[in-house]
Amino acid sequence: MQLNSASAEEDFQATGLLCREVIISLAQAVYDPAIHDSLDGVVPSDTDANRMLEAYIQFAFPGGSFKEVRSHARASLALALNLQHRRTATRQLAALCVEATGSTTAVISIIARAGE
């Protein structure tokens, strides 16, 4: 689906769904349960992007000084979930969601490249 051709609330909600799926796939790509422990001790499910990304970022940047990086990923996913379920979804919110998802992808890519 192209955001430019979207016209109805359902189209914009679908953008949220796609962004959520991108973030889940991103988390699955970088998360390794053998080395990334979740912050709360709960083993993430295959779709728990929050816990997987938090664990990955925490491993790369241990300690509280990088909590903003973890917050960035959480906020991006929260925006996607909000858009997906918002009955009054708009093009503007969908565009923000796409941008946030791209930004989170870029941030995780930067972290991953540093480990190479």
Image: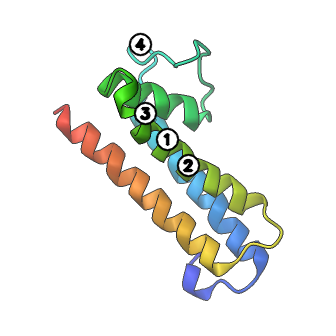
| Amino acid type of the residue tagged 4 in the rendering | Ala
Which residue: 57% across, 79% down?
3
Q: Which labelled disc corresponds to residue 67? A: 3
Q: CA distance from mark 1 to mark 3?
A: 6 Å
Q: Residues within 10 Å of mark 1 (few under 14, many from 20)?
A: few
Q: Quadrant of the C terminus?
A: top left
Of mark 4 and mark 1, the one earlier in the sequence is 4
Q: CA distance from mark 2 to mark 4?
A: 26 Å
Q: Which labelled disc corresponds to residue 97? A: none
Q: CA distance from mark 4 to mark 1?
A: 23 Å
Q: Which labelled disc corresponds to residue 34? A: 4
Of mark 2 and mark 4, the one earlier in the sequence is 4
Instruction: Say if mark 1 contacts mark 3, CB within 8 Å.
Output: yes
Q: CA distance from mark 3 to mark 4?
A: 22 Å
Q: Which residue is mark 2?
A: 75
103 up-or-down from 78: above or below? below
Q: Residues within 10 Å of mark 4 (few under 14, many from 20)?
A: few
**In the structure shown, which secondary structural element does the residue marked by tag 3 occupy?**
helix
| In the foreground, 72 or 111 | 72
Which residue: 52% across, 19% down?
39
Instruction: Say if mark 2 contacts mark 3, CB within 8 Å.
Output: no
Left or right position of 76 against 83 = left
| Amino acid type of the residue tagged 1 in the rendering | Ser
8 up-or-down from 104: above or below? below
**In the structure shown, which secondary structural element does the residue marked by tag 1 occupy?**
helix
Instruction: Say if mark 2 contacts mark 1, CB within 8 Å.
Output: yes
**In the structure shown, which secondary structural element does the residue marked by tag 4 occupy?**
loop
Q: Which residue is mark 1?
A: 71
Residue 98 pos. (x, y %): 51, 66
Q: Quadrant of the N terminus?
A: bottom right
